[in-house]
Amino acid sequence: MALLIDNASEILTMKTGLHVLRNASLFVENGTIKHIGSVKYTKKRHTTINARGCVVCPGFVDSHTHLVYGGSREDEFALRVTGVKYEKIAQSGGGIASTVKMTREASETELYDTGMQRLNRIAQHGTTTVEIKSGYGLNTREEIKMLRVIHKLERNSHLDVVPTFLVHTIPQHMNRNNYIDLVTKEMLPEVTRQKLAVFCDIFCDKIAFTRKESKTVLLKAKELGLALKIHADQFANIGAAHLAAELKCISAEHLECTTKGAIKRMKKAGVIPTLLPGATFFLQMKKKPNIRAYQETKTHVALASDYNPGSCMIYSMPKIVSLACISYGMHVEDALLAATKYGAKALNLYDRLGSIEEGKQADIVVFNVDHYKKIPYHFGEDVVKYTIKKGRVIYGEDS
């Protein structure tokens, strides 16, 4: 199976910086990028996409989502826009706890069906690889249920799906120490025994787990062979980013309250900071990540959607790129790199994803614009023309 993407106005390789090739073509065979540049003709049978007037980019890598869940939380949204804080809603039994209740009530079939519908929608917006976290079960049976659903989506979706076991919050009416014991002595061993996750993540913040509790969980996960992620410093700086550096997590995510010193430590440790402007926007947070500190320290970041029912119902990665530019003040070039190359690095997948290079997997988006700066500029318009996964068109005129 061969595909020629012909005569694109721009191809963004993302190999060294953005790296724009103008009026260039791309030849794909058997799901792999074979040639980039001038492709005049080929004797092999192939499908041709006329990309004149279009921008070609690596497929978006959404490295932080909570895409599998039951129910919805529109009532909380209505409360927040009247000024009620997210923390207050959570403390009164809403927030994560309400989604836990609805997810527990949903069957595996229901969670799978809604999950597949969401995967199909995100593919229409150029996402070709997505991480999905558990974390709405809060006991062994329900967390395993969620991870089984994610694993089934991984098997059956066109997209690459990366499963993460998330230690999200403490269940109502349960002692903190008892829950940490449950996670480390029962949940993590069962998750790894069934090989249901690649990563372990934990919410380390003032409304969730302490730095000490997070370290205990992550060290056990590492011992059992899982790679590490951490929800860090979203609502307060309690040293979560420093912990990410200490444990050499693959990524630290949110980081609204992270200091420049912690950013330097993460860079030295090889941690990929992952910023989530959709959540900051959706929650109307005044505190935002220190973009200048990342720029001054030459620290590359990833961008992800944080798509979830409570704090970000935005699953479109082009809109996340737009929000990073508008709300955080990121440069367009940095935001596009963050949603592709560094998203792949945040999932340990850059060896095969995240850039357009010969020999890499042909995960590609064709945008119906003639200049890459128009991708975030067209915030209110869907500009994805084709989404291509492993050389196959999964969204667009030929899908």
Image (cartoon, helix red, strand yellow):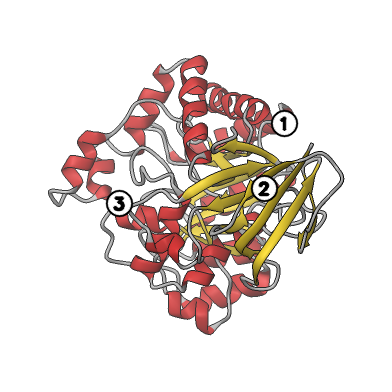
Q: CA distance from mark 1 to mark 2?
A: 26 Å
Judge the density around disc 1: few (<14), some (14-19), many (≥20) Cα neighbours within 10 Å.
few
SS label for mark 2: loop
Dot 2, how many residues are within 10 Å of its Cα: few (below 14), some (14-19), or many (20+)? Answer: many
Which mark, by number, is residue 85?
none
Can residue 288 be seen here?
Answer: no
Query: Residue flagged by tag 2: what amino acid is it?
Result: Asp
Looking at the image, residue 94 lies above or below residue 40: above
Q: Which residue is mark 2?
A: 363
Of label 3 and label 2, which has the lower sequence position?
3
Q: Is residue 186 above or below residue 208?
A: above
Q: Is residue 124 visible?
A: yes
| Quarter the C terminus occupies | top right
Q: Which mark is residue 282?
A: 3
Given contact means CB atoms under 8 Å apart, are the residues at marks 1 and 2 in contact? no
**In which image quadrant can residue 390 be found?**
top right
**Would you name the residue on which mark 1 appears?**
195
Q: Is residue 6 left or right of residue 386?
A: right
